[in-house]
Image (tube, rainbow, N blue to C red):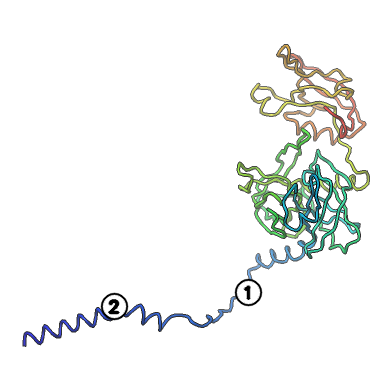
Amino acid sequence: MENRSVRWIGLAILIVLGFIALRPYVEDRLYSATTPRPVEPRGSLADYEKSTIEIFQRVSPSVVQVVGQVGGGNVFGQLGGEETGIQSGTGSVWDEAGHIVTNNHVVQGTNSLAVRFASGQTATATIVGTAPNYDLAVIRVTGVKLPPPIMVGESANLQVGQAVFAIGNPFGLDQTLTNGIVSALKRHLPTSNGRELSNVIQTDAPINPGNSGGPLLDSSGRMIGVNTAIVSPSGTSAGVGFAIPVDTVNRVVPELIKNGRVPTPGIGIVAASEAAATKLGVQGVIIVRTVPGSPAAKAGLRGIDAARGELGDVITGVDRKPVHQLSDLTQELEQVGIGKTVQIEINRGGSDMTVSLQVADISQARG
């Protein structure tokens, strides 16, 4: 009797062990999806998804890829994937005459340009005008069927926190949509010409190399800015991007189309950086030097005396309005306008004085 019980126990153990060993194979036979899975119907898209899709579908045809050739070679070869001597960015169709708005740094130094539309159509382009002080440029294509010009909004009434969208060609990946919010307003952004753009829009919408010159859009799909730069040690988006406000774009672009250049109000100085002024404990704009023949030079404004190690004039006000940094000065001069007389308040060697001079067009001045 005892032997029979032992046998039954042993048999039960064998059966359990066999089941454990065979279980994966049984489950594989019973539960493996060897035929296509049934598709589960989804519900309606959320309202914000619908609006985002609508913005992209409506605006993306008006956004183009701009490719510039630096040095020799065929620019159309760059559109085919070659990468020698290439500068790539984004642009927006501005009008029905074929004018396209982009960044100056996208076209600067190029000897030929090509544009690719969302439809895949390509065309050569020519530079109509550039405004390095605003990092804006207008190029033009002819003889092609154009998509609708991009809708233009306004930037003066933007609010921090509102949704924004960017369409561009980051890393050559065309027709890419990213979104985010207005992170900050009234930022200051240096340009390659030593000036500062004021009222620049800061956004966390991912902006990467190749997005330059593309539109920043509001939730109505209107252009509210032109994406121009990122701040990132790696050169890729780290949550801080900048866009030239559309109010500036809408003022500069017509001038470029008409005249090929934009008059730039100024007095003809080279200013020290804000960091240098802060380090020296100076409130105002330190004049490093004046441009020969400029209003500042004619009025006797003084720059730094490097030989003696002496500070020159520090601009502290314009027409009784305080000047704390270069952007304050340029903004006031733009409001006064070329040909008008201004009162420049300076501090010279600890003494305050006022100098009267005329605002001039410094767009072609050389310092």
Mark pair 1, 2: CA separation: 45 Å
Amino acid carrying mark 1 in the image: Ser
Residue furthest to the left in view is: 1
State left or right for residue 3 relative to residue 260.
left
Percent across and percent down for residue 133 are 81, 38
Quadrant of the frame with the C terminus = top right
- Which residue shows up at 73% across the image and 36% down it? 190
Question: Percent x, y for residue 161?
Answer: 65, 51
Q: In the image as oriented, which residue stretches furthest toward the front?
A: 73
Amino acid of disc 2: Ile
What residue is disc 1 on?
44
Determine the image quadrant of residue 276: top right
Residue 276 is at least partly visible in this image: yes
Which residue lies under the disc numbered 2?
Answer: 20
Q: Residue 260's spot in the image, x, y percent?
A: 91, 44
Relative to the observer, which residue lies in front, 211 or 316? 211
Q: Nearer the viewer, residue 222 or 322?
A: 222
Residue at the spot 72% in from the left edge and 11% down from the top edge = 308
Element class at badge 1: loop
Of badges 1 and 2, the one in the foreground is 2
Q: Using residue 39 as the reference point, say whether residue 91 is left or right of it.
A: right
- Can residue 170 be seen? no
Instruction: Give the residue drawn at x 23%, y 83%.
Output: 15
Please tell me which residue is depicted at 88% across the width and 50% down the height of the picture.
126
Q: Pick the residue in front: 265 or 160.
A: 265
> Neighbour class for label 1 at 10 Å: few (<14), some, many (≥20)?
few
- Who comes first in sequence, dot 1 or dot 2? 2
